[in-house]
Image (tube, rainbow, N blue to C red):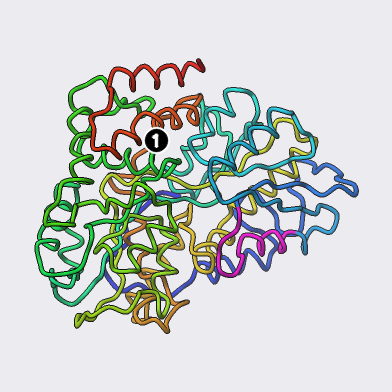
Amino acid sequence: MPEKKPLNLPLARRTVLEAIGGFVAAGAIGGAYLLGARETTREWEDVGDRPLQLLCSRDDTANGQRRLLVDQWNEWHEHHQVEMVELPPIVDLQYSTIHAVLQAEDPDVDVVEIDVPWIAEFAAAGRLHPFEDPDTDGFLKRPLEAGRFDGELFALPFHTNVGMLYYRRGAESDYGQGVLSEKEASSIASWSDLRETIRWILKEDNDFGGGIAMQLASYEGFTVNVWEYLLANGIDVDGDNGMIDFGGRDAHGLLQDLAGDLHEEVKPGKSVILPGALQHNEDESLAAFQAWKTPFLRHWPQAVRTLEQCGAFATADSAAAFEVGVVPMPGGVLGGGSLAVSAYSKRKNVSRALIEFLAGPTSQQLLFERGGFAATRPEPYFDAIAQIANGIPASGSDCESIGGPRSEAEAMYEALTGEGPGQRPEVQRYTQFSRAFQDELHPSLGKDAAPDFSRLESRLEQAIEGK
């Protein structure tokens, strides 16, 4: 279905689950997958006593919503059961496991969840089975297009992700307390805007140690966060593959600016980016924001579930009342997990049906409402916006209202469909590229020293070429 911007007028209350209720009663979900029945155009294989195997990242949702979806499938398909195998929470280990399984041409693994920048590598190597004549109606454009390689669709988006900027929202801005009005926070459209706001806050008499908590430890989060910084500051990218020319003067200057934001003090002991970010992953940066070390946090959409809970923030001497606010992160990069059929699976048709079910409208609504994920379809966002417009208390309006419509729905939708999200480079050896990027840049940023740009450019070229 065509994408549309949410209306600013009150909308009639009609959840997506209600809207498709008639179809569910008739036994249909979406246009491709039939609930409790086989799609007639593709005969499902007999799986015997060996369940389909779904290899995916660990389900860290509060209620295990992704596993609940698999349980639903198993309830409906007695003769086509699925075993969900969860991988370690560290992205690099997930890649290593999936790479090893696919390289070994293991026929016991049928469906894999892959991070969006890995799709090109695995598709180019012939490790994934393409979707023939796929039904792509109803997906958000960018998460769907991330599953394509050389014009063919190899993966459907299971959940999507994009960088978001968290702040303490109040009725009025109070720099001394690190609190911003919604209007002021919404005006932050670039890193220059963010830097200026941070400087005003840090110049006040408060105990912040830095302006923003980020994920800059030496892992994939470093690549994502630095890439966002470069995109937000207007770096030129190749329109075909999203690459940046690191031999150019723009890249040199912006990376030096990044080092300055980490190490130059606005006031004694206070820098624009919290220096500890160089050792922080998602969990540690979230904890820094909760401990009042920064007024801002760069994180993924799932973080709001933690931040809206009662007792989410350490006790602090603050007279300002606030709620957690969220707006698109300048330069926010697309993330998320997509589902693909292994080229070595012997049950490709039923594997595809499983993917269509997990990526379908009802699954996406449940993952959005109950699992905290960013949906890959527009309806869950419109549903939440309509509920809030009609006076239903949003989740996080107070810490007791967890479970209401997601207050950040409009901000997420804007981040996913507006000028962003940015993309990481679409190269066939992305993981090697990212590791080289981290190895060359992280040590120099930690020492506040200029990187060897010619060496960086050479290492990245070698990584892409597989040398």
Mark 1 is on which residue type? Arg
Q: Which residue is mark 1?
A: 424
Q: Is residue 4 magenta?
A: no
Question: Is there any visible trace of residue 12 in the rendered image?
Answer: no
Q: Residue 260, percent across and down?
A: 18, 42
Q: Is residue 458 left or right of residue 149?
A: left
Return the residue found at the far right: 49
Q: Quadrant of residue 213?
A: bottom left
Magenta-tinted stretch = 58-73
Q: Residue at x 84, y 59 (%)?
A: 78
**170 vs 422: above or below:** below
Q: Residue at x 66, y 52 (%)?
A: 86
Q: Residue 394, percent across and down?
A: 37, 76
Question: Is there any visible trace of residue 446 in the rendered image?
Answer: yes
Q: Residue at x 27, y 50 (%)?
A: 275
**269 vs 257: above or below:** below
Q: Residue 338, percent across and down?
A: 55, 44
Q: Is residue 335 left or right of residue 189?
A: right
Q: Is residue 68 magenta?
A: yes
Q: Residues within 10 Å of mark 1 (few under 14, many from 20)?
A: many
Q: Quadrant of residue 36?
A: bottom right
Q: Secondary structure at mark 1?
A: loop
**412 vs 105: above or below:** below
